[in-house]
Image (tube, grey):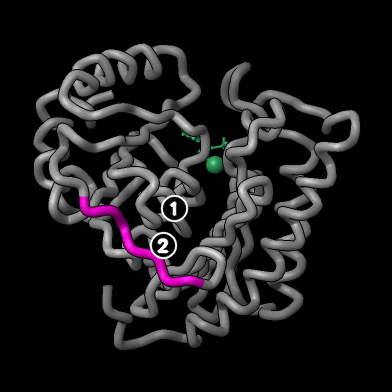
Amino acid sequence: MSAPTWLPTDPVALLALARPIAEEVAATLERSLDGDGPSVSAKSTPTDLVTELDTWAEAHITERLLSARPDDAVQGEEGAKVAGTSGITWCIDPIDGTVNFVHGIPGFCVSIAARVDGRSVAGVVVSPLHRDVFTATIGGGATRNDRPIRCATPASVARSVVGTGFGYDPDRRRRQAEVLARVLPYIADIRRAGAAALDLCSVACGRLDGYWEVGLNPWDHAAGGLIATEAGARCADLDGGAPSERFILAAPPQTWDDLAALLSEADAASV
Ligand code: IPD
Ligand code: CA
C-alpha cells in the first residue's frame, strides 16, 4: 500500500512513539500473570470480559501518547475517547485476547495504531508471551522482531490453514458456527486463536494462510490490518472494499478471491 500524499506526521515517528509504550505495557501484563490474577468483570455479555489491567493499560497508553502529542485524538476499547486537532487518531486495544489473558493462555497482545481519516498509517502489536513485536508503517513494510515479514504463498484454499473469531453474542456465535461448518470441509484446517490483532499478524508472517471475522471493532484490526497489508496480504471487505466492522478477510493475493468466494457461498457476511 502506498503512503497517502498528505500525512500530518511521519508514520515512522508515530511508530517510534507507540512501540516502546506497547512493549512496556505488554511486559507489565506478562509480569501480572505471576500474581493472583486481575479482577475481572463482564461487558456486553457474560463472556465478554474486561480486567482491571485492560482499564489500567488503556489509561496508561492514552496518557503516554498524549503527553508526547497533546493535539492527537484517541479512541480505545475500554472507552477512551479524546478529540484532537492534529489529524492523527490513536486507536488502542489495550489487551486484545482478554479471554486468553484471563486464562493465562499466551495469545493476548497490546495493539496501537495511528490513523488518518480512518486509515491506519502506523501500527504495533506486542505479544509478550510469544516474544513477538509486529510493526508496520504505511508504504514502509511490516516487521516481526525487526525483521521484514511477508505473508504465505499457499498453493490453494484447500491447502490453507485459516483463522477466524467469534463475537460475544450467543445468537451470532451460533450462526458463526454454522458458517464454519460450511467452510471447514474446503480448507486445510481452522484456527480460533482468540485475538484478532494476532490473527492478522499471523497472516502477515505466514503462520496463517488467511483470516476472516465479522463484527470486529476498529481497535481489533487497526494495527494488525496494516501489518498484514504491508506484509503483502490483501485485507478487505468481502466486496473488496476497505475492511470494516462488518467484515474483514485477510489472505495472500493468490488465494484471496477463492477464499472470498467460499465465504460468500457460506453466507459468512450475514451473521
Ligand atoms: C476479541 C478478540 C477475539 C475476536 C473478538 C474480539 P477482545 O477482542 O480479538 O479474537 O474474535 O471479536 O472482540 O475482547 O479480546 O479485546
Ligand atoms: Ca479486542
Q: Indicate the amino acid at tag 1.
A: Cys
Q: Indicate the amino acid at tag 2.
A: Ile
Q: Across the whole image, how many numbered discs are drawn on residues?
A: 2
> For residue 121, which quarter of the picture?
bottom left
Magenta segment range?
Answer: 147-153
Image location of residue 115, percent across then percent down: 46, 68
**How many neighbours does mark 1 have within 10 angstroms: few (below 14), some (14-19), or many (20 or more)?**
many
Note whether 226 is above or below 101 in the view shown. Answer: below
> For residue 182, which quarter of the picture?
top left
* Left or right, 57 with reference to 31: left
Q: Is residue 148 magenta?
A: yes
**Does any portion of residue 269 appear in the rendered image?**
yes
Image location of residue 2, percent across then percent down: 27, 79
Q: Closest to the observer: 66 or 257?
A: 257
* Left or right, 42 with reference to 213: right
Q: Closest to the observer: 21 or 87?
A: 21
* Residue at disc 2, secondary structure: helix
Please give the name of the residue rendered at 15% of the width and 52% of the height, measured from the top-left corner. 240
Secondary structure mostly taken by the magenta-highlighted segment of the chain: loop
Q: Is residue 173 magenta?
A: no
**How many neighbours does mark 2 have within 10 angstroms: few (below 14), some (14-19), or many (20 or more)?**
many
Image location of residue 55, percent across then percent down: 75, 44
Residue linked to disc 2: 227
User: What is the number of the mark on residue 138?
Assistant: none
* Residue at disc 1, secondary structure: helix
Q: Are marks 1 and 2 in contact (CB under 8 Å)?
A: yes
Please give the name of the residue rendered at 71% of the width and 31% of the height, measured from the top-left corner. 104
Please give the name of the residue rendered at 36% of the width and 35% of the height, measured from the top-left corner. 163
Please give the name of the residue rendered at 64% of the width and 54% of the height, measured from the top-left corner. 131
Earlier sequence position, callout 1 versus callout 2: 1
Residue linked to disc 1: 201
Image location of residue 130, percent across then percent down: 61, 48
